[in-house]
Image: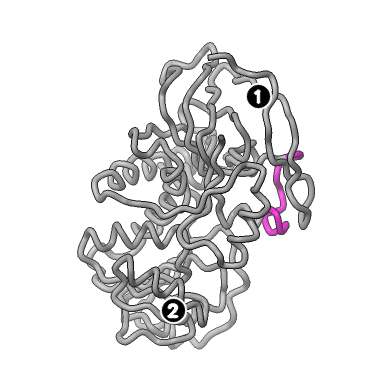
């Protein structure tokens, strides 16, 4: 195929300012990179954290977006793992060094020298992008479509968070019923687990959406569930939900904070943590997470519900996400 020399991209220049629609050069892959023609890119709450300056070390003139689905159209001279025509997903983790203590002990998600797609590396709010061949995930044909984009972050972080709770948990709470939750509930129901969905207070539409997907119970985040639950995952970036979740957790239960950014956690009485309850965070993801989850998503099979926007509508998509107007996930589709 004929590859153009320029492309459309939405570029981040400054916190608290909208992205700027720009015409920029199509990137040239380095020896170990592939050039990917983007099919679609999901819009994530992490993108909002970048826009709001809460993640404050983005690369200059950043192209955001880290839930990328696309087709390889070019390769660097040292690329052996991928070929033109391959369908790939590009997630948040875009590079690790391989030699720091975390990489050496199998925790590449904590790499001291990591690169992150759509944050320290240019991402997918554009027509083309480049990525290291070893950090691209193979996609099945059904996943190489706009509906597959949310699997690359909402799905992966949801899956890593899910793996932090006890395997025998029967009753699982999810706080913040957005893109990650609507994927994770399908995995949990596939394994016959009960989901208790907590939404913004008064968000009856999201509660109805959760019940439609099989939630045992759905209600306001400030409401106690009808019974104590074995573990909870917090996707909402609200620190005050940590003690709220602990109040509803059984002895020995776990509360997992699944976001990259969260407001401060208020002080709470030790009695909420006592009896061996656990509070823990999840950071990034590993390539192993990606391979495992994409295989599982195909087996379930996971069906995503998406609202499509054009790349030029990225700012509208971000505002819709910020204001809770997206049920499922927002996805930029390249046309």
108 lies left or right of 212: right
**Label 1 sits on residue:** 27
Q: Which residue is rendered at x = 43% and y = 16% of the image?
A: 80
- The magenta-colored residue range is 50-61
User: Label 1 vs label 2: CA separation?
Assistant: 45 Å
Label whose residue precedes the other's in the sequence (1 or 2)? 1
Q: Which residue is rendered at x = 60% and y = 19% of the image?
A: 30
Nearer to me, 112 or 78: 78
Q: Which mark is residue 245?
A: 2
How would you rate the neighbour count of disc 2 (Cα within 10 Å): few for under 14, some for 14-19, many for 20 or more? Answer: many
Q: At which x and y percent is residue 282?
A: 47, 58
Residue 113 visible, this orientation: no
Q: At which x and y percent is residue 142?
A: 34, 38
User: Residue 141, relative to residue 55: is it above or below?
Assistant: above
Q: Is residue 220 in the magenta section?
A: no
54 lies left or right of 39: right
């Amino acid at each position: 195929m004929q590859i153009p020399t320029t492309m459309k991209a939405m570029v981040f220049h400054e916190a608290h300012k909208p992205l700027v629609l720009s015409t920029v050069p199509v990137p040239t892959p380095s020896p170990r990179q592939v050039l990917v023609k983007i099919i679609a890119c999901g819009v994530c709450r992490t993108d909002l954290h970048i826009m709001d300056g809460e993640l404050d070390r983005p690369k200059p003139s950043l192209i955001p977006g880290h839930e990328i689905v696309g087709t390889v159209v070019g390769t660097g001279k040292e690329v052996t793992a991928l070929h033109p025509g391959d369908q790939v997903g590009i997630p948040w983790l875009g590079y690790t060094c391989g030699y720091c203590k975390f990489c050496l002990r199998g925790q590449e998600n904590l790499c001291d020298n990591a690169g992150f797609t759509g944050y320290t590396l240019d991402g997918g709010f554009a027509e083309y992008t480049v990525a290291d061949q070893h950090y691209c995930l193979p996609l099945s044909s059904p996943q190489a479509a706009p509906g597959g984009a949310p699997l690359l972050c909402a799905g992966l972080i949801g899956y890593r968070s899910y793996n932090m709770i006890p395997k025998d948990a029967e009753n699982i709470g999810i706080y913040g019923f957005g893109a990650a939750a609507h994927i994770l509930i399908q995995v949990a129901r596939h394994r016959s687990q009960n989901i208790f969905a907590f939404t913004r207070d008064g968000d009856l539409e999201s509660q109805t959406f959760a019940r439609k997907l099989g939630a045992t119970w759905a209600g306001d985040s400030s409401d106690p569930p009808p019974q104590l639950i074995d573990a909870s995952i917090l996707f909402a970036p609200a620190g005050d939900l940590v003690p709220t979740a602990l109040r509803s957790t059984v002895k020995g239960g776990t509360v997992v904070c699944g976001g990259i950014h969260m407001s401060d956690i208020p002080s709470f009485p030790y009695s909420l943590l006592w009896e061996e309850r656990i509070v823990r965070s999840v950071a990034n993801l590993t390539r192993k997470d990606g391979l495992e989850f994409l295989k599982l998503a195909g087996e379930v099979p996971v069906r995503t519900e998406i609202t499509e926007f054009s790349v030029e509508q990225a700012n509208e998509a971000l505002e819709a996400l910020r204001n809770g107007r997206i049920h499922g996930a927002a996805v930029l589709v390249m046309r």
